[in-house]
Image (tube, rainbow, N blue to C red):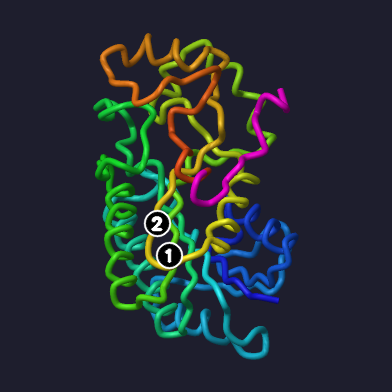
């Protein structure tokens, strides 16, 4: 049984990832500052801004486990504004460097990490270059949080250059949701501007977990990044009508139909086999 370390495994997305990997035959170690509400074991409390702790966590912690085969790095201050910008930068950048460097030392060649939809230019007060947005244009960070995510993607290029055997999969997750979050979705129709900041997108945590597993299982080496969103928007208004009302001057790279997401998951479908199964419309 392959063993994966999941940093941030007690978080909103992390809990779903841990459950999903266990259900699909992985032995999972949760590395976080607090235990999971799910009570997953093995768990080790860790401060990833301490390089020594990161190294121990990816090699061996006493008799709890001995080494890991893959790393899923989700741990971070999860959004802009939760702490001062300098604290967000220090924590998130240092933690990411430490886990990638520790993984290199430990000989771990299979890494999936959480990038973010924010590198696409969120909030879209400055319109994107086209719609649907995808991985083809350069990152456009608009916050310190997003700046770190952009720097992580650049950093990973160099880790892959140093180690040609490294497979590193960056997942630009949209806004993570659980079924209990969906009750508020119909209210978004009263003011579409409330969710315009991320083009009315979201990701069901269960589909986010699916994307992580597919990233671990993908063939090849080197870095790839993927936009990971649910297949639809949070709105009942058709997507083409949202575009016409709010972005009438933007180029459409291809037609959009129904309630299709404007965060393109075409690359993830093509290269990962990502086929999201969950929508809020099944719960409301």
Disc 2 secondary structure class: strand
Along the viewing direction, whichever of 222 and 44 lies nearer the viewer = 222
Residue pointed to by mark 2: 224
State the image coordinates of residue 58 (x, y, percent, origin top left). 51, 80
Say which label, 2 or 1, has the lower sequence index: 1
Q: Are marks 2 and 1 in contact (CB under 8 Å)?
A: yes
State the image coordinates of residue 55 (x, y, percent, origin top left). 45, 82
Q: In this view, does 224 lie above or below 166?
A: above
Q: Does the segment drawn in magenta span residue 273?
A: yes
In the displayed structure image, the side of residue 252 where residue 63 appears, left or right:
right
Q: In which quarter of the image is the N terminus?
A: bottom right
Q: Callout 2: 10 Å neighbours few (<14), some, many (20+)?
A: some
Q: Does the segment drawn in magenta span residue 184?
A: no
The extreme bottom residue here reads 62
- Tally the numbered discs: 2
Q: Callout 1: 10 Å neighbours few (<14), some, many (20+)?
A: many
Residue pointed to by mark 1: 168
State the image coordinates of residue 107 (x, y, percent, origin top left). 46, 83
Work out how far the residue at label 2 is from the one at label 1, CA to CA, in angstroms. 7 Å
Along the viewing direction, whichever of 127 and 256 lies nearer the viewer = 256
- Give the quadrant of residue 23: bottom right
Q: Main secondary structure of the magenta part?
A: loop
Magenta stretch: give its range. Answer: 270-284
In the displayed structure image, the side of residue 257 where residue 152 appears, left or right:
left
Tell me the tag on residue 256: none
Along the viewing direction, whichever of 92 and 255 lies nearer the viewer = 255
């Amino acid at each position: 049984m392959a063993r994966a370390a999941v940093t941030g495994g007690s978080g909103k997305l992390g809990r779903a990832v841990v459950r999903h990997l266990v259900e699909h035959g992985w032995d999972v170690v949760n590395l976080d500052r607090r235990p999971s509400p799910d009570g997953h074991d093995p768990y080790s409390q860790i401060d990833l801004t301490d390089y020594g702790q990161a190294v121990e966590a990816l090699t061996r912690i006493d008799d709890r486990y001995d080494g890991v085969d893959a790393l899923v790095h989700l741990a971070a201050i999860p959004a802009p504004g939760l702490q001062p910008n300098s604290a967000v930068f220090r924590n998130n950048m240092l933690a990411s460097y430490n886990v990638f460097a520790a993984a290199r030392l430990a000989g771990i060649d299979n890494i999936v990490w959480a990038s973010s939809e924010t590198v696409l230019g969120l909030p879209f007060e400055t319109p994107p270059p086209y719609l649907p947005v995808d991985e083809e244009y350069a990152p456009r960070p608009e916050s310190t949080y997003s700046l770190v995510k952009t720097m992580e993607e650049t950093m990973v290029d160099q880790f892959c250059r140093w180690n040609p055997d490294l497979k590193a999969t960056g997942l630009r997750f949209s806004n993570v949701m659980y079924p209990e979050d969906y009750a508020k979705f119909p209210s978004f129709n009263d003011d579409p501007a409330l969710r315009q900041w991320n083009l009315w997108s979201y990701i069901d945590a269960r589909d986010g977990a699916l994307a992580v597993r597919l990233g671990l299982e993908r063939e090849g080496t080197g870095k790839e990044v993927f936009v990971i969103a649910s297949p639809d928007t949070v709105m009942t208004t058709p997507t083409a009508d949202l575009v016409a009302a709010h972005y009438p001057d933007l180029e459409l790279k291809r037609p959009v139909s129904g309630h299709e997401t404007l965060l393109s998951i075409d690359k993830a479908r093509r290269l990962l086999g990502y086929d999201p199964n969950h929508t809020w419309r099944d719960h409301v």
